Amino acid sequence: MALFGKLRWISRRFTTLAATPLRICVVGSGPAGFYTAEKILKAHKGVEVDIVDRLPTPFGLVRSGVAPDHPETKIVINQFSRVAQNDRCSFLGNVSVGSSVSLPELHEMYNAVVLAYGAESDRTLGIPGEELGGIYAAREFVWWYNGHPDCRNLAPDLTSSDTAVILGQGNVALDVARILLRPTMELAKTDIASHALAALEESSIRKVYLVGRRGPVQAACTAKELREVLGIKDISIQVKQADLVTTPADEVEMKNNRIRRRVYELISKAASSGHSPPLPGQRELHLVFFRKPDRFLESEDRSGHVAGVRLEETTLQGYDLGKQIAVGNGVFEDISCGMVLKSIGYKSVAIDGLPFDHDKGIVPNVGGRVLADSFKDVPQYETGLYVCGWLKRGPTGIIGTNLYCAEETVASISEDIERGVLTSNSTKPGREGLLQLLDSRNIRVVQFDDWKRIDTEEKRGGNLKNKPREKLATWEELLQVARK
Amino acid sequence: MFLTKFSGLAAHAIKDLVKAPSFTWRTSYVPVIQNNYAQALRRKSFCTTADKVSEEGREEKQKVSVTFVDKDGEEIHVKVPFGMSMLEAAHENDIELEGACEGSLACSTCHVIVMDVDYYNKLEDPADEENDMLDLAFGLTDTSRLGCQIIAKPEIDGIRLALPVATRNFAVDGYKPKPH
């Protein structure tokens, strides 16, 4: 018996080293997916990794989330491209898990599946009027100006009034405010989608309100993005002096959090230096604190379209560290506007056959191992199923956060390889099987070489217009160039 | 001989200037060049009369000793030429320091901790842009810097840099920045 066990151990050891490699599929080619792939390839010489993505283009939010005027942030694409071109790695684009191939099918074909498909939906406010025209999720607006093919036809209403209200004060809110307010001459030199640039050139929006439920100490943005929006050329920054008064609880928050302290300092500095009434025609950015949206107001002369937002004043309650909550005090005010962008958080979407925590909007997991049943005391894991990035920990953090997130998930995978939970002795067809299945379903896979054709074409188009790239922003164009 | 040395020196200075664009917002980089220049000038007069041995000595003197301490506490000793950033030095020596934005001050993945406060004080103060990125660094300490912003110069000879042990702080529910 002991000998048998030993033999099995040897055979297991042998197979890990032998010709059949362990085959891992990563779903999603954003930072979480690529960092996961990179770390698996580095840690395990005998493992093959395929990265699938529903889009024909790789890099997820680095391509469709990072603002066009942040080219330095996109440099990480160089590193991800090297990973994709590793002999043991493949990028398989235009493959949607859930419709092109089901998760159980994928799980059957690979030794392990790592889900890193992010958060492609939005939190909602749940207040009256949210369905009115002219109200968009910030994500949709970001996808639109970044040339994501799913928002090519968003056509946001930038001309019916001079005012836009942005709900939320995180970095996404600041990004969209900057895009709305920055001189289009400056944006023209970026890789902003041409349809968006054309629309922004015609935009009548001169006044942007950034509305937060809490105060300047709790604003969710970081210093870099705030500094940028405050530094837009010829802009008037409006902050109510009364909002800058801090409480002892605020002081504690700032003392314990360097970001909060530096953000507050920037806001108060901007308030004191630029507090003069805006000149006629000057663009205005209003930082509005201690207000929560109560309802959206419908236009009287344009049925079904937003004409304003009713805000309720708030006060902060609770002294728990970082847990001051905004509570409405029954005093209301209206801001008229023709456009609203809700920047209150992204949300992940569940797929069939995957455990999902709908409250938190994440896949229940411990250290990246997917929990089969999160209600049991003793955790039961889904064998060979892992999660990384926003789907694992919720939609917060920067690109670099995924580095540590991926390290943790890959550590779990490595442990499972070592413990024999994942072995390559069961025959898994991997890439070959997947490609055959997709072929039988007439799904045209976009591989990394095909993406390089898109990349070359985009750069060529950009060159003609003196910008880094001219993004192909429709499914048809992308697939057509990929097939050439 | 003098001419050759001088042209070599000029090339060196030009090389630094060529590098400068990626650091243009960092005014403190200028003194680095000046230091470099002055150092090289002093050496030039010395070298004109020197033999091969001092030639080698000169090679050695244009580098500083840097010790990286990795996540497992292992020490890696490297020699870094003047003007080179610690991020570049780490990559040249296969030290696992990420550099997602390749030194353009748009990420915090090359975060290092200066282990000795005296050395930390010898560095120019971080610019606002670097502080903005350090805000987001994992396991930030009072002597944290970005590796891409520490440039080898004579004063930092012997500096010890720790790579942060961030993974062990990484919680499933999301990382909470350490009070600073």
Image (cartoon, coloured by chain):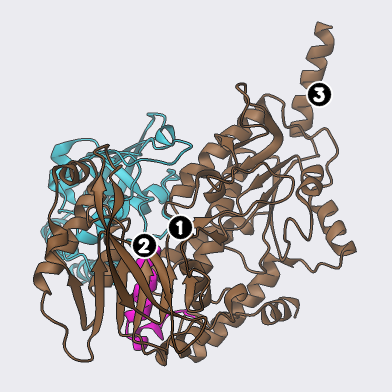
Chain colours: A brown, B cyan
Q: Is residue A272 above or below residue B39?
A: below
Q: Which label number is shown at residue A120?
A: none
- Closer to the chain start, of discs 3 and 1, is 3
* Residue located at (60% from left, 43% from top): A387
Disc 1 sits on a residue from what chain?
Answer: A
How far across and down, in percent of the image, does residue A316 sit? 24, 49
Secondary structure category for the residue under label 3: helix
- Closer to the chain start, of discs 2 and 1, is 2
Q: Amino acid at mark 1?
A: Gly
How far across and down, in percent of the image, does residue A22 sit? 74, 39
Q: Quadrant of the C terminus of chain B?
A: top left
Disc 2 sits on a residue from what chain?
Answer: A
Q: Mark 3 sits on what residue?
A: A11
Q: Mark 2 sits on what residue?
A: A171
Q: Mark 1 sits on what residue?
A: A345
- So how many labels did they put on this image? 3
Let me know if residue B157 is in the magenta part.
Answer: no
Looking at the rendered image, the disc whose residue lies closer to the viewer, 2 or 1, is 1
